[in-house]
Image: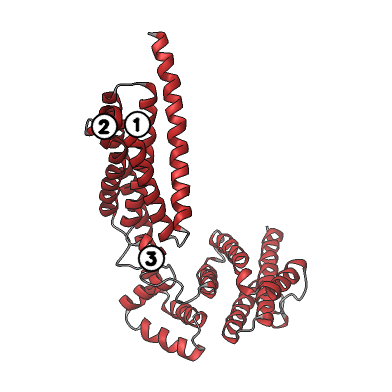
Amino acid sequence: MISNQNKRYSEYLESELEAAAIYASLAEVENDENRATIFRKLVDAEMRHAARWADKLGIDSSNLKPKTSGPKILSLKFAAKLFGTNKIIPLLLKIEAKEVDIYANDPEAQDLVGEERQHSVTLRNLTKSPGSTGPWSSASILRSGGSLRAAILGMNDGLISNFSLAMGVAGGTNNPDFVLLAGIAGLLAGAFSMASGEYISMRSQKDVYEHEILKEAIEIQEWPEEEEEELTLIYQAKGLSETESKKVAKRLMKDPEIALDTMAREELGLDPSKLGSPWGASISSFISFVLGALIPILPYILRLQNSAFLLSTILSLAALAVVGGLLAGFSGKNILWGSSRMVLAGSAAATVTYFVGKLVGISVTEFL
């Protein structure tokens, strides 16, 4: 039992010393002094953790030093020097996540989980470029409560699914009433399915966000000093000096509500006032799906008879081009390419279903 316990302590000690060595290597190659200081702080934190396990093993912690060699340390240092420390951070986040999982399942290490999580937050903030996404950026627009995202996706899904459905039925029969009936059924089924799915998705997402914010509120109440240190590191990662960061963090922590709002935004990347509306996304999704699904069957609704098939195809392809262009524009891609890609995808789906419908229609006719 004691042997297994010491083995576990030794593994923890080696892991902390290795992590400290990695951060020390990054501090050496980092040209930005603010970032280098943060890496050195992370070295100190990992060495404090290492000292705990050394003490449990009866090792004099004052003699501990980060490891200076090893394939992982040397390769990461070389990669950081070649490509920059930002390229290494995703690997460090995996290392920190692994430590959090291990410590969370060990009663003797659970008090270290909060600090290990703090390391991950600090690393994530080091990768962020201030000003890369403003309030009117494409990404922000698509994230705004989920409603616009749901509307665009709903329109696209309604258009492609009902276009394909209408073409499939039209391939199997010459009766436009059958195409209209299938189109309306597809419109209603798809719209209700899309709306309910979007509601459940957004509701679940909002529940998760609210739970994360509640956990943050508890941490602010129970461990204010750790949270203040976390805020300090976050603002240092954004470019403030250590003194300025401490002043800002201390001022924010004086008001728990402001501190919670700040931590939600800075650590979790959430705006507590904009967690999304499940009903808004659901209704938006329903309406947009209906609008998209109406386009292929509109000529059939207007009883255009022999011209219905051709007009349905033209209207659907034109709508696909517009939706593809909008999606490309929102994502900063080439609008012409986005439109062309959407038209090709929709055409391929409709063509396949048309010929499948034609084959099924011929088989049914022969059977009858």
**In whole angstroms, how far apart are the C-alphas of marks 2 and 3?**
39 Å
Task: Give, as a three-letter code, the residue at label 1.
Answer: Ala
Earlier-in-chain disc, 2 versus 3:
3
Judge from the rendering whether residue 145 lies leftward or rightward of residue 125; answer left or right. Answer: left
Res 335 seen here: yes
Report x, y in % for residue 337: 48, 53
Write down the residue under mark 3: 140
Report x, y in % for residue 140: 38, 65
Write down the residue under mark 1: 166
Name the residue located 37 percent from the left edge and 60 percent from the top edge.
142
Q: Is residue 246 above or below residue 299?
A: below
**Quarter of image, res 28:** bottom right
Write down the residue under mark 2: 300
Earlier-in-chain disc, 2 versus 1:
1
Neighbour tally class for label 1: few under 14, some 14-19, many 20 plus, Cα within 10 Å: many
Task: Give, as a three-letter code, the residue at label 3.
Answer: Ser
Judge from the rendering whether residue 327 lies leftward or rightward of residue 65; answer left or right. Answer: left
Labels 2 & 1 near each other (Cβ < 8 A): yes
Judge from the rendering whether residue 71 lies leftward or rightward of residue 223; answer left or right. Answer: right
Q: Is residue 257 above or below residue 176?
A: below
Q: Please, what secondary structure does the residue beneath circle 1 have? A: helix
